[in-house]
Amino acid sequence: MFPILAARTLAPLVKEFVIDARPVALKAKAGQFIVLRIDETGERIPLTIAGVDATQGTVRIVFLEVGKSTRKLGTLGAGDSLLDFVGPLGNPSHVEKFGTVVCIGGGVGVPAVLPIAHALKAAGNHVIGITGARRADLLILEDEMRGACHELFVTTDDGSRGDRGLVTDPLRRFIAEGRKIDLVVAVGPAIMMKAVAAATQPHGLKTVVSLNSVMVDGTGMCGGCRVTVGGQTKFVCVDGPEFDAHQVNFDELMMRQRMYRNQEKTALTRYDECRSAQPREEVTSRG
Ligand code: NAD
Ligand code: FES
């Protein structure tokens, strides 16, 4: 079992757990992910590692309660345990001294880009961060991103914090101003990563994205996470999760992400109905 040592809510429906998982903490590198299961009947949930403390043997994960399984995960708290916590999975980010790197995190993609920004800064790069969310209350880990970057630009769609607009706005501005950029790394919703790729491609700026596709086993066996990159089929879990953004077929990725949306919605509605039908003390027993 893998105990949850600490839990906190970062934004509505966005939670952070610190897990006691020494074997994962000792090996994990920026860009990798884990797959967890709450219990024997639970689905496998893939999550990008948001940080590790090798000395303490802990791994930090951040998740959005988007379906039945993540909603159930969100009912747990410090003192509870997870049945499985497998990792690190996937390839680590390619980290070297590139020069000036722009690290972009959109919404719940921010926790995934944070360790990459830290690693790139430690490798001697000048790291420019862009972090964005729809509204101020959905903006997460801003201070930590500030610490991981030399400069940080904040956007919200409605202007309630930072500049009004999308994360691609500062990026387009840097490009228009002729700022020297050697690499762009973007993690967030697929539509955002597609927009980042569209902004950088005409200027030949090397751009890497971390894909979050439908995953089942996370070990290259089921084919659930397949994407098309450069016209070839790739499995995100073993060939990625990071790919050259200019080669990714984002439209196909988004279509595959939508594939089970109705079933997920039905399962979540049923789960929420069951929970609200439970006696009040059971429903409210956890934070
Ligand atoms: P969101 O929809 O709130 O968007 C976050 C920000 O992304 C926006 O504020 C905006 O700045 C930018 N953005 C969105 N659409 C854009 C567009 N068309 N052009 C330019 N910028 C745009 O994001 P959210 O709800 O927090 O994210 C949810 C998604 O993030 C999940 O569906 C999940 O798939 C994805 N995610 C991906 C990873 C990963 O490793 N790739 C990790 C965590 C989450
Ligand atoms: Fe099964 Fe990648 S999740 S092959």
Image (tube, rainbow, N blue to C red):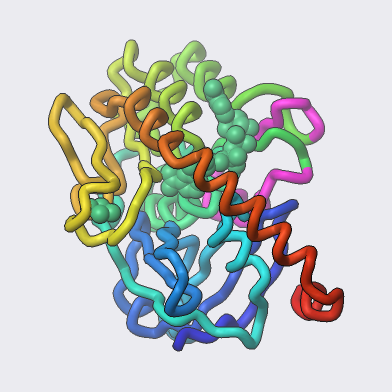
The quarter of the image holding the N terminus is bottom left
Q: Nearer the viewer, residue 68 or 60?
A: 68
Q: Is residue 223 magenta?
A: no
| Position above or below: 197 against 271 | above
What's the residue at 28%, 28% (across, down)? 248
Give the x, y percent position of residue 123.
Answer: 34, 54
| Position above or below: 225 against 17 | above
Question: Ligand 1 shows up in which quadrant of the image?
Answer: top right
Quarter of the image where one finds residue 219? bottom left
Q: Nearer the viewer, residue 240 or 94?
A: 240
Q: Which residues are magenta?
A: 137-160
What's the residue at 78%, 72% (across, down)? 278
The quarter of the image holding the C terminus is bottom right
13 to the left or right of 231: right
93 to the left or right of 68: left
What's the residue at 28%, 61% (across, down)? 217
Q: Is residue 97 visible?
A: no
| Position above or below: 216 against 180 | below
Give the x, y percent position of residue 163.
Answer: 72, 27
What's the residue at 28%, 47% (across, down)? 224
Q: Nearer the viewer, residue 275 or 284?
A: 275
Give the x, y percent position of residue 229.
Answer: 21, 31
Give the x, y percent position of residue 275.
Answer: 73, 66
Which residue is situated farthest in the left direction here?
232
